[in-house]
Image (cartoon, rainbow, N blue to C red):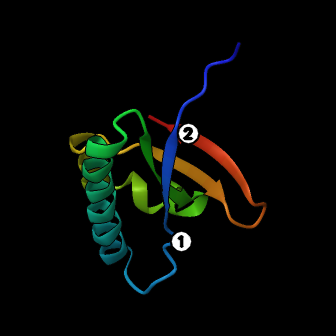
Amino acid sequence: MGRTSKIAVEIKSFIGESDISTFHTALGQYLNYCQALEEIEPERIVYLAIPYETYQDFFQLSFIQRALRRYQVKLMIYDPKLEEIKQWIK
C-alpha cells in the first residue's frame, strides 16, 4: 500500500507590479495557513506554489533564499503554460 500525504497549496502567480510585495503577501499567507492548520489538521503539509520563471529568477536572490530557510517554506514549482508541476521542494 502506498503512502499518502495531506497537503494544502497556496498558489501565487507573481504577475503583479512588484515581486517583493507579492512575496511579502505570499509569505505572510503561507505562515498564517501553517499556523491555522497546525491546530485543526497538524498532519497537513502546506506548500507555496510559484511559477517556474519566478523561481528561476526572483527566488534565487539571497534575501529570498534566507527567508525561505528561516521560515522553512515548502515550495511547489509549476509551469503555468504547460499546466504541470516541475518540482517539489521541502
Compared to 5, does 3 lie above or below?
above
Residue at 52% from the left image edge and 37% from the top image edge: 6
Q: Are marks 2 and 1 in contact (CB under 8 Å)?
A: no
What is the distance, in whole Å, between disc 2 and disc 1 at their CAs? 16 Å
Give the residue pinned by disc 2. Answer: 88
Residue at 21% from the left image edge and 42% from the top image edge: 70
Say which quarter of the image contains residue 2: top right
Nearest to the observer: residue 34 or residue 49: 34
Quadrant of image for the N terminus: top right
Dot 1 surroundings within 10 Å: few (below 14), some, or many (20 or more)? Answer: some
Give the residue pinned by disc 1. Answer: 13
Dot 2 surroundings within 10 Å: few (below 14), some, or many (20 or more)? Answer: few
Residue that extends furthest to the left in the rendered view of this protein = 70
Compared to 36, does 43 lie above or below?
above
Say which quarter of the image contains residue 79: bottom right
Residue that extends furthest to the bottom in the rendered view of this protein = 17
Compared to 31, does 2 lie above or below?
above
